[in-house]
Image: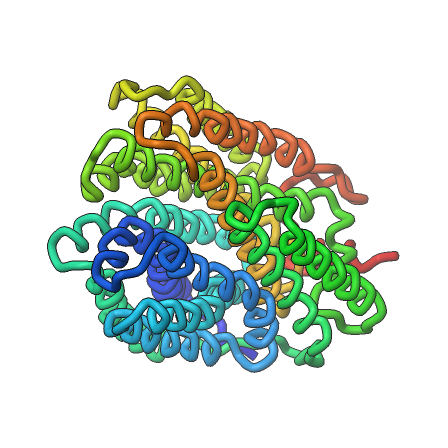
């Protein structure tokens, strides 16, 4: 039984977990801006450089849900600390990599460690804060740190590469990992499911294959052709693994993922909303990097600095979203997120070579605000769909949706500008900004699905009275 913590203890746990979340989010985007320097340093071409990013994304996405399930069973702090150790060791290997092959392998190892951090840290926070309103506020802070880390990656990476070289992108992880290991040992209590669920090895294996092949198809699609025989083979493999996973899970008494949850519009909408938000974020980051550096000749540091309004918007608005969720439910912040994200995309649908910097900064600010308002309600809705005993899996489901959204956004944005020269980048990227606006519009549908409904006792609200309430409803035939 997890000991009850006082308010200071609960928020200290949140701070320690946010430190690890900042590390994972930063590492997702910080490497992008250093790819040209990595290519020069290791003598590797564009395809090899893409796998420096994709190896991390692929492994992370494939293992998130399995890591969350293992943490629920064997102890969340234990798995969290293992993840920190693996991530730290892999970062050192990245920093010392003598070749591109070693770097890609080390990045895959980083993905293994990161899969044990993101959903597990969220599960620790959920179990430390049983009160739904306090938990919603905490998730708002969590979302702010995550948004800040994702958006701050480009500017941090640009500064490090220019000052210390590309290897510093990985050395910087070492002191953060050491601090998180010490703090987690002192302040984070162990927690696990009161009744350990039996391991669902077939379900975990099939889900890993389905997610890995799906992400791999998104990564390779722009290069091998979306309708090529190889791509069709990947689609078929992903479809077979997905169907087999659904059949296996529907017959198990204790499945890895209770698929009946997806029958609930609120839960399904939260997962799809997380995917859409990360499509928009990654399209924005990648198109901006190409446009500013290759299209307008900006330095990596200048291009990264231009995205600071995005980081500011996400950081300021995410805690506010958490408070709104705690008081009013998920719908109001989702409506705000949809409006700001749509406006940010529409600002740049007419992008050209001479678009003014004020308009660019305004668009990035609007996208950041939309991202900040979206994360907390989507995450809170997902973790409220499962009891605290399954918090690791609950957090991992939305984390997996985010990674799929990131891979899809990168694939789509990369496909738009892959063959465009510097002078054509602005025009080629316009459909991408329409996609960002469309993702914002989709959040209006998610907000509609999340409307609070009267329960049998006449209550309204977006936050369940008891953490297990929505789980009980989902399990009713």
Q: How many marks?
A: 0
**Relative vertical location of residue 117 with respect to residue 422 in this rendering, above or below:** below
Percent x, y for residue 317? 39, 37
Q: Residue furthest left?
A: 163
Name the colour scheme: rainbow
Q: Name the residue at 59% across, 41% down.
A: 273
Is 91 in front, or is 218?
A: 218
Residue 456, located in which quarter of the rendered image? top right
Percent x, y for residue 231? 63, 52
Q: Name the residue at 30% across, 38% down.
A: 312
Percent x, y for residue 120? 50, 68
Q: Quadrant of the N terminus?
A: bottom right
Residue 344, located in which quarter of the rendered image? top left
Is 16 in front, or is 462?
A: 16
Q: Residue furthest front?
A: 229
**Relative vertical location of residue 408 with respect to residue 15 in this rendering, above or below:** above
**Relative vertical location of residue 216 with respect to residue 271 in this rendering, above or below:** below
Q: Name the residue at 26% across, 53% down.
A: 34
Percent x, y for residue 55? 45, 63
Is 149 in front, or is 109?
A: 109
**Left or right: residue 174 compared with residue 385:** left
Q: Quadrant of the C terminus?
A: bottom right
Q: Residue furthest right?
A: 477
């Amino acid at each position: 039984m997890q000991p009850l913590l006082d308010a200071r203890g609960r928020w200290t746990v949140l701070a320690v977990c946010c430190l690890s979340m900042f590390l994972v989010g930063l590492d997702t985007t910080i490497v992008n801006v250093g790819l040209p320097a990595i290519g020069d340093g290791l003598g590797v071409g564009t395809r090899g450089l893409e796998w420096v990013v994709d190896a991390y994304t692929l492994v992370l996405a494939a293992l998130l849900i399995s890591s969350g399930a293992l943490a629920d069973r064997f102890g969340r702090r234990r798995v969290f600390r293992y993840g920190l150790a693996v991530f730290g060791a892999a970062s050192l290997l990245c920093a010392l990599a003598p070749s591109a092959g070693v770097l890609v392998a080390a990045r895959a190892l980083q993905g293994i460690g990161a899969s044990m951090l993101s959903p597990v840290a969220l599960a620790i926070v959920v179990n430390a804060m049983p009160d739904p309103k306090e938990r919603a506020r905490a998730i708002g802070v969590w979302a702010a740190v995550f948004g800040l880390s994702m958006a701050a990656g480009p500017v941090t990476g640009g500064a490090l590469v220019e000052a210390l070289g590309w290897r510093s992108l990985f050395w910087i992880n070492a002191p953060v990992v050491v601090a998180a290991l010490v703090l987690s040992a002192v302040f984070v209590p162990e927690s696990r499911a009161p009744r350990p669920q039996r391991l669902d090895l077939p379900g975990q294996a099939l889900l890993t294959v389905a997610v890995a092949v799906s992400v791999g198809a998104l990564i390779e699609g722009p290069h091998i052709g979306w309708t090529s025989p190889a791509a069709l083979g990947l689609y078929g493999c992903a479809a077979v693994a997905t169907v087999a996973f659904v059949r296996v899970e529907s017959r198990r008494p204790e499945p890895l993922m209770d698929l009946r949850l997806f029958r609930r519009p609120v839960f399904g909408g939260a997962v799809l909303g997380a995917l859409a938000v990360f499509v928009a974020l990654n399209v924005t980051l990648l198109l901006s990097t190409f446009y500013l550096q290759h299209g307008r000749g900006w330095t990596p540091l200048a291009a990264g600095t231009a995205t600071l309004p995005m980081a500011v918007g996400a950081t300021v608005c995410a805690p506010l979203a958490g408070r709104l969720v705690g008081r009013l439910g998920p719908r109001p912040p989702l409506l705000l997120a949809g409006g700001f994200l749509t406006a940010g995309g529409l600002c740049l649908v007419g992008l050209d070579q001479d678009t003014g910097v004020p308009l660019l900064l305004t668009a990035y600010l609007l996208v950041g605000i939309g991202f900040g308002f979206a994360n907390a309600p989507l995450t809170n809705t997902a973790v409220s769909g499962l009891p605290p005993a399954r918090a690791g899996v609950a957090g991992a489901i939305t984390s997996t949706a985010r990674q799929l959204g990131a891979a899809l956004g990168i694939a789509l944005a990369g496909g738009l500008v892959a063959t465009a020269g510097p002078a054509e980048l602005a025009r080629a990227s316009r459909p991408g900004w329409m996609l960002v606006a469309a993702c914002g519009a989709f959040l209006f549908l998610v907000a509609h699905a999340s409307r609070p409904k009267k329960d049998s006792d006449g209550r309204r609200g977006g936050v369940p009275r008891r953490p297990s309430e929505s789980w009980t409803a989902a399990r009713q035939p």
